[in-house]
Image (spheres, rainbow, N blue to C red):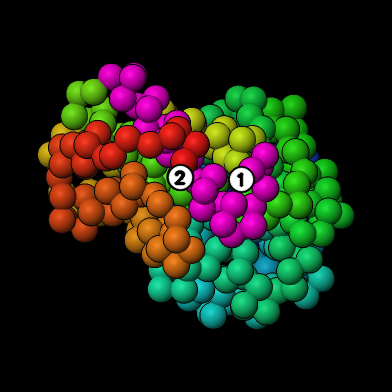
Amino acid sequence: MKAAVFGAGSWGSAFAQILADGDLEHVTLWARREEVARSINDDHRNPDYLGDLALPPKVTATTDPAAAADGATLVVLAVPSQSLRLNLEQWGHLIPRDALVVSLMKGIELRTGMRMSEVIEAAGVQRERIVVVSGPNLSREIALRQPAASVVASTDFAAADRVAELVLQPYFRPYTQTDVVGAEIGGAVKNVIALAVGMAEGLGYGDNTKSSLITRGLAEITRLGESLGAEPATLMGLAGVGDLIATCMSDLSRNHRVGVALGQGSTIGELLALPHQTAEGVKSCFSVVELASQHGVDMPICLGVTAVVSGKASPEQLTGALMSRARKHERG
């Protein structure tokens, strides 16, 4: 059995390790850049993303998507969410028609408001073959084989169960789900909330402020998820509150780090110019608030983050706007 992982960033590389530590015979990483593929093949390392951590010998890399996909029984997609559609247009037809397709991406597509599984399905992959993995999965900790858990979700429980079987490791525990909507909404919106929490830290605010933002952010995630058909219990689990806590509080989280830098006075242009530092929330915030508007969902934190990212407000103004909102019932 062979797996192909499209996307040799932090999470794609760490997930390749998870698969290689199991029963799969071979794992091929598809990388955009030749130097990344060469480093993985020659040194078993991906220095741009995982520093000096060694990848298992079963992991090799290529820049040829056809070579990566050839013979794969499992195809994992780990490219930036906003580039997924273009990537699938270029090499989606190479995905074997009987392979399970795993999405590691956490975002909402700009302009369409589609979740990543919906983009994959629109590219011609049957819904029952699509599996979403989402949870508190900071890639460097997983690459260090520190214990972590995640949700493996698919509308076809057998597909979710098969992927869970392949990724189960002493340091990685999967839980199966059929609520794909909940898993994807939790994973996408938490990136936006993490920007807000990071901004609060950058402004010098303490744990009361950050805890308040996380909790009210969870309320926004749950409202949007429910409006789209997600099960509230999913958003109280690993793919919801678990992922939210990890992303909002860890220095390993890119969205958290970008938020801190914004709070300390950096501009979004300066941060976007940094190499290998994609923060999904910076782009997804726009699609999240558009989706919320379409469904009549109140998401003031996400709306405020979008204003800061677009240069229409400062982090200080975001704080003031949230604190001056009219009083309401906590569950309102």
Residue 291 horizontal/vertical position (percent): 45, 63
> Relative to the observer, which residue lies in front, 136 or 227?
227
Q: Which x, y percent locates residue 235?
A: 60, 41
Identify the mark at residue 134; answer none if there is no mark. Answer: 1
Q: Quadrant of residue 259?
A: top left
CA distance for labels 2 and 1:
18 Å
Quadrant (top left/top right/bottom left/bottom right) for the N terminus: bottom right
Q: Residue furthest top?
A: 207
Residue neighbourhood size for the residue with mark 2, other residues' Cα within 10 Å, grouped as few (<14), some (14–19), many (≥20): many
Residue 175 horizontal side relative to residue 280, left or right: right
Residue 211 shows in the view = yes
Please tell me which residue lies in front, 37 or 330. 330
Residue 206 placement: quadrant: top left
Q: Residue at x 40, y 63 (%)?
A: 293
Packing grade of label 1 (10 A; few <14, some 14-19, many >=20) is many
Q: Which residues are magenta?
A: 206-234
* Amino acid type, label 1: Ser
Residue with the mark numbered 2:
220
Magenta stretch holds residue 218: yes
In the image, is 305 to the left or to the right of 16?
A: left
Report x, y in % for residue 326.
28, 39
Callouts 2 and 1 close, C-beta under 8 Å: no
